[in-house]
Amino acid sequence: MDFNSLIQGALPTFVANASHGANTSAERGLSGLLDTLSPLLGFQLNPLMRVFMIVYNMVGSHLGIDPTYIITSIGFFWAVNKVGMQLSTTFDLLARQYFMANIEVSNSDDIYSHVMKWLASLPRMVDSRSLTAETASKSAWDQEDESELMTARVSPDGHGIFLNFSNQEAEAAPRFTPAMGVHSFWFRGRYFKLQRRQESLFDPSAGANGMPQYKDKETLVLSVFGRSPEPIKQLLQHAKEQYYQSHQAQTIVRRPAGPAMRRYGHRHSWQQVANRPVRPMKTVVLGDEQKIRILSDMNEYLHPATARWYANRGIPLRRGYLFHGPPGTGKTSLSFALAGVFGLDIYVISLLDPTLTEEDLLALFTSLPRRCVVLLEDIDTAGLRRNDDPESSSSSSSDDEKNSEEQEEADKDKKSPKKPRYKSKKDWKVSDLAREFKRHGNSDSTEKKSISLSGLLNAIDGVASHEGRVLIMTTNKPEALDEALTRPGRVDLQVVFTNATKEQARELFIRMYEPDRSRAVLPSPAPPLTPFSAASATPFSVSSEENGNLTDVSGATKIGHDDPSSPALPPTTDGGEKEMPEGKLHPTELSPTELSYIAEKFAEKIPPGQFSPAELQGFLLERKKTPQQALEEAEGWIEGMVALKASRTRVSAVQ
Ligand SMILES: Nc1ncnc2c1ncn2[C@@H]1O[C@H](COP(=O)(O)OP(=O)(O)OP(=O)(O)O)[C@@H](O)[C@H]1O
């Protein structure tokens, strides 16, 4: 059959199909056309197309309209949407470029976390359709809903109640932040646009050991209509204030960032490692005179007018303190309390950090904020290398570890120096291998020269060194320090810490047992002192302040409380000899007078200058719910500790 006769044969059918009524056209329109054209064009409809045609016909017959219209409309709307999106992107771009002010915030800056935290709290953002869920990390100090802790479980022996935190992660709600892309929100009556974008940057030496690595960099672009970025600046200020309001009364602790980040300098040099509640000055037991002296010295130094005073006299604006005394006497505690009093962040540097070079140290000091506390702990153990001593202390310590076997071999080598020193395979022992590894490891770490004394001095008061900071160095052995380190100008004030005096022991006792002014009383220790019915007990009692005293409002049984109905304590102000309160009383049941009386008795028992506040604190912590038990057991503990110290053993059987 030729083409002409085929057309002549097929065309009438096609015309008939096409000119059929409206309802039949829906059924037959496309399928009829395809049926007609397929032999014409010489192809067969495949099964998929046949299924499509069946569905097509069904839709057509059900809706009573030609599905071609539907397909055409969908295509039209898709095209309009595409064009619309393209136009909107172009308009957005043009608007941002010519009609909007923009501010970019990088995720390597603290402002990024301020803005993200604030955005996460915006109701409009939380309801947005495009969000990123993040696990909200909580520090040990973050406030928790204490009622949730009632998920306590009965102990296996049925005698106690233990808190159970196995589900805490599951119960913690995630934090929702705007996802990557463009968002909008209102703030103080203005319309803002937010673009969150991420790019992967190739950093040739960002990874461990300087290996190349891709790093994600996030940027927030905040835009507002108008030519002035002022509204965005206000927004950023607001986000920052909100952030610090929630972190009020906290001390931020920073340490040097990893070597890869340190390379970028300035704000990348330090990383926040902790955020802890401010340590109140009154919790550091130290002579009032000493406290007042250092507080007023620091206050004067940090005063804004002091900078001018120093500058006029050509004195570098630096202040250094040396806290020295036996371990556990409060040197670190005072440093934190001082930072808390003045609302400063603490920057802690360990000179023993194997990755820290002298250049790093200098860079770290130069990238400190205007006012801060820099803490160099245990400076005597830092292994500072004297300039005239080429061997670092670390290498000398590795020499000490050579055992007699190696010594013997070295002696042998001396006798026959030409003979190469090696062992046959069968002579190798696992211990040899371990030693080799250790030596190899040591040699790696000593490849990096330890910090020299002059390197440290240069960092803390060299010409390029930072001004405005407060430097606190702590040590247990002040006599081991180099004179150059402690000369005036580097150390302006020395604070001596001693083992506890009687007065300090008394104060520590009171601090331990005075009523907690916060919401809840600490849970009683889990191991039961007396068997009790688990069903009737709660792990702790919620207290409220009433007339200045803490009173139990739960009515619940207290674990470890021997006799809840013990008689009221006798008054102690009758002019005669004070009577000793009886029974093992819960601290909340002691009046201030009674507490001070027991504290006095406790202090009398403590030999002055023999125990550090940390040791006394440890003893009292063991008996934190039972002040009288502490008083009664003090003598036994002292005897045990004296014997322990005499035996110079570190293993303690005394609690
Ligand atoms: N004078 C003090 N007042 C209150 N608490 C103290 C005091 N001294 C020590 N403590 C307590 O003992 C513990 C250890 O204290 P801290 O770390 O401040 O001692 P340190 O002198 O810095 O010790 P080290 O020399 O070993 O670093 C802390 O829990 C602290 O609360």
Image (tube, rainbow, N blue to C red):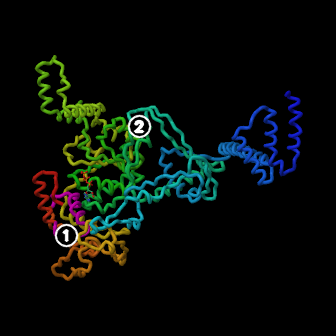
The kind of secondary structure element at disc 2 is helix
For residue 307, say whether it is visible.
no
Give me the residue at 27% from left, 69% from top.
Answer: 159
Q: Which residue is mark 1?
A: 629
Q: Which residues are magenta?
A: 608-633
Badge 1 crowding class, 10 Å Cα cut-off, few under 14, some 14 to 19, many 20 or more, is: some
Asked if the residue at label 2 sits under 8 Å from ligand 1, the reply is no
Give how far across and how far down residue 523 sits, in percent. Answer: 31, 67
Q: Which residue is mark 2?
A: 260
Element type where label 1 sits in the image = helix
- Tell me where residue 623 appears, x and y as whole percent: 23, 66
Mark 1 or 2 closer to N-term?
Answer: 2
Query: Which amino acid lies under the numbered mark 2 shown in the image of this protein?
Result: Ala
Given residues 252 and 148, the one toward you in this image is: 148
Categorize mark 2 by other alpha carbons within 10 Å: few (<14), some (14-19), many (20+). Answer: some
Q: Is residue 439 above or below residue 236?
A: above
Coordinates of residue 478 in the picture (x, y in percent): 21, 46
Q: In the image, is residue 601 above or below residue 177?
A: below
> In the image, what residue occupies the spot 87% across and 40% down?
13
Quarter of the render that holds ligand 1: bottom left
Query: In front here: 140 or 306?
Result: 140
